[in-house]
Image (tube, helix red, strand yellow):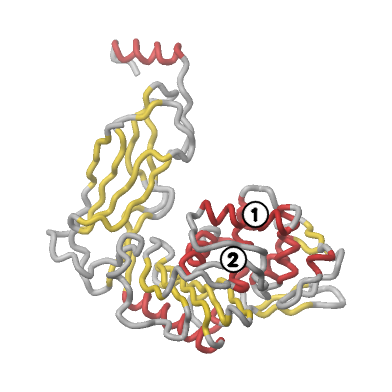
Amino acid sequence: MRFAVLVLCIVVSVLGPVSGAYAEEKSKDTGSNTAAVDLAPGARSAILMDAGTGTIIYEKNSHDKLPPASITKIMTMLLTVEALDEGRLQLTDKVRTSEYAASMGGSQIFLEPGEEMTVDEMLKGIAMASGNDASVAMAEKIAGSESAFVDLMNKRAEELGLKDTHFANCNGLPAANHYSSAYDIAVISRELLKHDQIIKYTGSYQDYLRKDSTKPFWLVNTNKLVRFYTGADGLKTGYTAEAKFCLSATAARDGLRAVAVVLGEPNTKTRNSEVSGMFDYLFSQYKVHTIHKEGDAIGTLKIEKGVKSELPITAKETYSVLLKKGVAQEGIRHELVLPESVKAPVAEGQSVGKLVVYQGTQVIKEYELKAGEAVPKAGWWKLFKRTTGSMFGVD
């Protein structure tokens, strides 16, 4: 289909030098964007990503396949909140603990066989206390068994385009053929952060389970950064003897949200210190430049033989790019690329074009644009009236 490029220029000023003005996505340039200093010398693998744009600021062995320990639970939480958003679960639903779930060792909330907690309480137990038992109980609630839930985890990883990940369980306990990478974990973390409600759990430092019972259980977040680093509100720690100390962390400040992942750290002090330093680097060196805010009208797509002749295109999220502080944003412009028209029917969520952001002549970001609603094919009578109406100047 022939494409017409509709250029919506927002050139800030006359084009100047483009080097250093933005943080380019590593998927497009794997060699030129790593921070000049090693931000995580103690980690076996690490990555620093801007959550808003997906721009990679720093990486170290980020595609190495390593045991992820309890960082595995980020995918478990993602599938849980997706089930909540889709209405397949409610926070008030009761989750029964099986003998198998109660038998999990390691970090746990000491669920008894047959004990019931709500989905809300289970999420607290997973996010804050890293409960292996709570993770299995939720997996069984959602999929019927842990093995069926693991299949969903691997399917979701494939949908996210992850190449370095394979799950064997839902909690990260040592298992054969269970691995991920710092890059893949950052992508899963970014996806989880699209569900705002998760911060209620990952960002809380302390809470209680069974508070009004004879056996109250005090929860203290295993991620100490949520208390000691300003803006930190997640996501998940991990440790096994094989994986060493791991962390996928997030923090928000001045309109930016960072995701930092470290794997194979020697101890918790080094882990927390290096992640804090990664956050400091991003917040001190970068700023966000917004192209379109969520809900902004972007353009109009012509529809052939549909019940509607035009479909408005709006921003489904905030479209932005990451820029270096202290460097003027010369030459930042964007182009809306849409076909001249598409034939009905058009499905909701169907890809219909893209928004391309340039620094001078270089592409620095592309956003896929999707139809915000379905447009069915029009019947012959509607098409006939539309044709005859246009002949006589009637809409």
For label 1, the residue is 151
Question: Dot 2: what SS?
Answer: helix
Mark 2 or mark 1, which has the lower sequence index? 2
Look at the image and tell me in which quarter the C terminus lies: top left
- Residue 132 in percent (x, y) is at 71, 71
Q: Is residue 279 above or below residue 164?
A: below
Give the residue at x 39% y 26%. 343
Q: What residue type is labelled 1?
A: Asp
Mark 2, residues whose alpha carbon is within 10 Å: few (<14), some, or many (≥20)? Answer: many
Look at the image and tell me in which quarter the N terminus lies: top left
Q: Residue at the front extreme?
A: 176
Marks 2 and 1, Cα distance to the nearest angstrom? 15 Å
Q: What residue type is labelled 2?
A: Ile
Give the residue at x 38% y 38%. 352
Give the residue at x 24% y 46%. 8
For label 2, the residue is 74
- Left-right relation of 184 to 32: right
- Are circles 2 and 1 on residues that touch, CB within 8 Å? no
Question: What number of labels is visible?
Answer: 2
Q: Which of 167 and 22 is in front in this view?
A: 167
- Residue 329 in percent (x, y) is at 22, 64
Q: Nearer the viewer, residue 223 or 163?
A: 163
The answer to which quarter of the image holds residue 235 is bottom right
Q: Which of 185 and 19 is in front in this view?
A: 185
Label number found at residue 283: none
Q: Is residue 383 above or below residue 329?
A: above
